[in-house]
Amino acid sequence: MIHASDVPAALAWYANAFPAATRKVIPWSEGEFECLEFDGVQIEIVPADEKVASGAAGSVVYWYVDDFSAALAHFVCVGATLYRGPGEIEDGQRMCQVRDPWGNCIGLRGR
């Protein structure tokens, strides 16, 4: 789950950030819930509130990317900001964190 103050805008941003993701509509008791599915992972955008705010404050999901430099450039191009790194890690890989427009961190790692 990714918390954001503007769920429709965040859903559109993440669809742009993960262009291979597919939109998925899930029916539930209060209507329908729209999310994204990417590489077997469901990306759910939910409202930030007084209990869970958006921003860098906990766990970060790291996505393995085939071309680290291209992936980092793509995320920056769609409006993410570099937050941490990039740094060199094991086996010639690199990793970093970028922040979405709501301050949430996305981890990237790859060659």
Image (cartoon, rainbow, N blue to C red):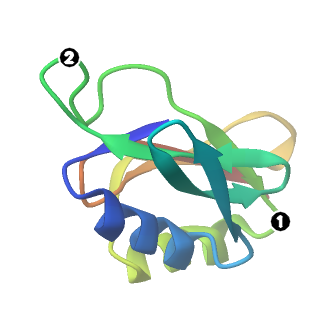
In the drawing, does residue 55 fall left or right of residue 50?
A: right
* Residue drawn at 48 percent across, 71 percent down: 75
Q: Which mark is residue 44?
A: none
Could you classify mark 1 by the number of other residues whose Cα lies within 10 Å: few (under 14), some (14-19), or many (20 or more)?
Answer: few
Tell me where residue 9 sits by quadrant: bottom left
> Where residue 90 sits in the image (x, y, percent)?
80, 33
Rounded to the nearest angstrom, the CA distance separating label 1 from label 2 is 36 Å
> Where residue 93 sits in the image (x, y, percent)?
77, 48
Residue designated by label 1:
66
In the drawing, does residue 22 fall left or right of residue 105?
A: right
> In terms of depth relative to the viewer, which is nearer, 75 or 27?
27
Could you classify mark 2 by the number of other residues whose Cα lies within 10 Å: few (under 14), some (14-19), or many (20 or more)?
Answer: few
Residue designated by label 2:
51
In the drawing, does residue 26 fall left or right of residue 47?
A: right
In which quadrant will I find the C terminus?
bottom right
* Residue drawn at 38 percent across, 42 percent down: 46
At label 2, the amino acid type is: Lys
Badge 1 vs badge 2, beta-carbon distance below 8 Å: no
Q: How many marks?
A: 2
> Where residue 97 sits in the image (x, y, percent)?
46, 46
**Residue 94 visible:** no
Label 1 sits on a secondary structure element that is loop
**Residue 23 visible:** yes
Q: Is residue 37 above or below residue 62?
A: below
